[in-house]
Amino acid sequence: MTGLINGQLKLYDYAGAKPSKTVSSRPHRGACRAVKFAPGGGGAFSGSSDCTLQLRDLETNKPSWRQKAAHAEPLNALVLAGPNGVATGDDGGSVKVALARP
């Protein structure tokens, strides 16, 4: 899973002889600065410079949970905190914990 400066998320499968793109979306208006697979691998958390945080279902390629104003300043760090939780940090030094409820 890769987060891009244009807000896109891309997931590639390297199991075959040639890499193939399995998921591509643009869930953020700002740069996607942090991405982590959710426990179990069925989803991915992402945080952005547009201050949003989301959990995206990788099977449907749709958001299953989203927090639009997760921080007052751009997010730059993301760490898993339990099976449905995530801790995030922003450019201003604030740290928050959220519980994703898909």
Image: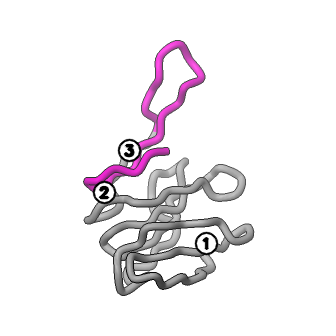
As measured in the structure, the alpha-carbon distance from the residue carrying label 2 to the one carrying label 1 is: 19 Å
Give whichever of discs 2 and 3 has the lower sequence position.
2
| In the foreground, 80 or 22 | 80
Q: Is residue 35 left or right of residue 99?
A: left
- Residue beneath label 1, please? 86
The image shows residue 75 at horizontal and vertical percentages of 41, 72
Q: Residues within 10 Å of mark 1 (few under 14, many from 20)?
A: many
Residue 45: x, y in percent? 53, 62
> Is 6 contained in the magenta span?
yes
Instruction: Give the x, y percent position of residue 14.
Output: 54, 25
Residue under numbered circle 3: 24
Q: What residue type is labelled 1?
A: Val
Query: Where, by quadrant of the figure, is residue 31 drawn?
Result: bottom left
Please tell me which residue is depicted at 59% across the width and 81% down the height of the picture. 98
Report the magenta residues as a range. Answer: 1-22
The residue at 47%/40% (across/down) is: 11
Front-most of residues 20 and 80: 80
SS state under label 1: strand
Q: How crowded is mark 3: few (under 14 residues within 10 Å), some or many (20 or more)?
A: some
Lateral position of residue 12 relative to residue 83, left or right:
left
Nearer-N-terminus badge (2/1): 2
Q: Residue at x 55, y 83 (%)?
A: 96
Q: Mark 2 points at which residue?
A: 7
Front position in the image: 90 or 6: 90
Task: Give the secondary structure at mark 2.
Answer: loop
Marks 1 and 3: which is nearer the front? 1
Work out whether 36 lies above or below 19: below
Give, as a three-letter code, the residue at label 2: Gly
As measured in the structure, the alpha-carbon distance from the residue carrying label 2 to the one carrying label 3 is 11 Å
